[in-house]
Amino acid sequence: MQIHVVQPGESLWGIGQMYNVPFETIRDANQIPEASRLVVGQTLVIPFEGRLHWVMPGESVWEISQRYGVPFDFILRLNNLPLSAVLPVGFPLYIDRPVPMKPVVDVGAYLNPDITGDESTSVVNEAGEYLTYLQLFSYQMNRDGTLTPMDDQAIINTAYENRVVPLMVITNIEDGAFSTELASAVLQDEERRNRLLDEALEIMQEKGFLGIDFDLEYVGAENREAYNEMMREARVRLDEYGYLLSSALAPKVEPGMTGDLYEGHDYAVHGELADFVFLMTYEWGYSGGPPRAVAPVDQVQRVIEYALTLIPSDKIMLGMPLYGYDWTLPFVQGETQAEAIDHQQALQLALRYNAAISFDETAQSPYFTYYDETGAQHEVWFEDARTVQAKFNMIKEYGLRGMFYWVLGWEFPQNWLLIEENFTVNKRL
């Protein structure tokens, strides 16, 4: 499989000819609605065994063989080239190499029925073969320690049908937002913590959940130790039934980061007590902030490297967004609210407004600008196959447990193709 970046003047048919792959195969794999129209800068995942290397000025077959770790004479035989071959610039050199054993990883994804609605079970069925865990978002805690119920039995049943482990997500959401005050009301009171765990266990046994994921955000420094204590209590209680314990952690890059989002999460304690943690490595670019990459690879790497100083690598699940944002310019702090869009919607915007897609090499993220019908300028940042592959490479390099997605329901077909190309998904059911 190969990632191809569309160049000016290229067509889907011509790209198919280049790789000797039917254009219909490329169209269907990337879910391209209009086969005759591509966006300059758009990535295509090509279902293609091996890969092609286009010869650059001054390159020799020997240099190319060293780059890819493939024997020099093997490349010559594979391409029917003589020993003394001098290749012209742009020559498509076929590079084949033994397929290594794919790393086995866990893959999780959050599902919010408020987003997917009646399509929730269909969404789980579509993604199910690529998932180890399904995190059902969310059971919201109340100030007395009880939990707001969810109508989710059909979704849980669908998870089991796809051999996906259903996890119960518990949040401190109140009036539509994460609440420090709500966290304090429950975490600081032992009786309320016990009530929450009692109710959670009752729901898990009734519905078939196999673990808890605590997604408590903006907990604040004042609740750090109380949150740690609830993790300890949960560990003991869940162990009685063989249930899993996980937590979602804010993306820290160094010790001592200030702010309610960061100070309530103790990486070391969660890393010790949880079976695994979900690193929320996204939202650098967010709806209320200025335009930038949602999950820039350079910043994601900083989070991984810091987390590894406190959390075992085989407990770290790397967060990956299935969405991007469309900002209307000029950005005004406190006023501008970007619209969340998925990969396919980003491409449709670029097509509609005839925008070429650029690529930020540092963030490993695509972006483009356009003017709408009213004359307003927009800036769009999203993720493509190059972004995903860069993060998959880090998962391999650092030996992480796997990755998870926020949130199912956003369309990003290339992501699932690349999972299949890079990994074997662990099925724990």
Image: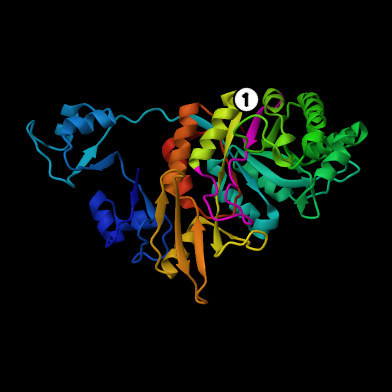
Q: Residue 374, percent across and down?
A: 52, 77
376 in relation to 202, above or below:
below
User: Looking at the image, which is closer to me, 284 or 105?
Assistant: 284
Query: What secondary structure do most residues of the magenta stretch adopt?
Result: loop
Helix, strand or loop at mark 1: loop
Provide the residue span drawn in magenta: 273-296
Q: Is residue 293 magenta?
A: yes
Q: Quadrant of residue 268?
A: top right
Q: Quadrant of residue 405?
A: top right
User: Looking at the image, which is closer to me, 85 or 243?
Assistant: 85
Q: Residue 117, percent across and down?
A: 68, 58
Q: Is residue 59 magenta?
A: no
User: Looking at the image, which is closer to me, 171 or 99?
Assistant: 171
Query: For mark 1, what is the residue?
Result: 311
- Kind of residue indicated by mark 1: Ile
Q: Residue 111, percent across and down?
A: 65, 49
384 in relation to 398, above or below:
below
User: Looking at the image, which is closer to me, 191 or 151?
Assistant: 191
Few, some or many C-alpha atoms within 10 Å of disc 1 (few <14, some 14-19, many ≥20)?
A: many
Any part of residue 425 in sight: yes
Q: 344 left or right of 70?
A: right
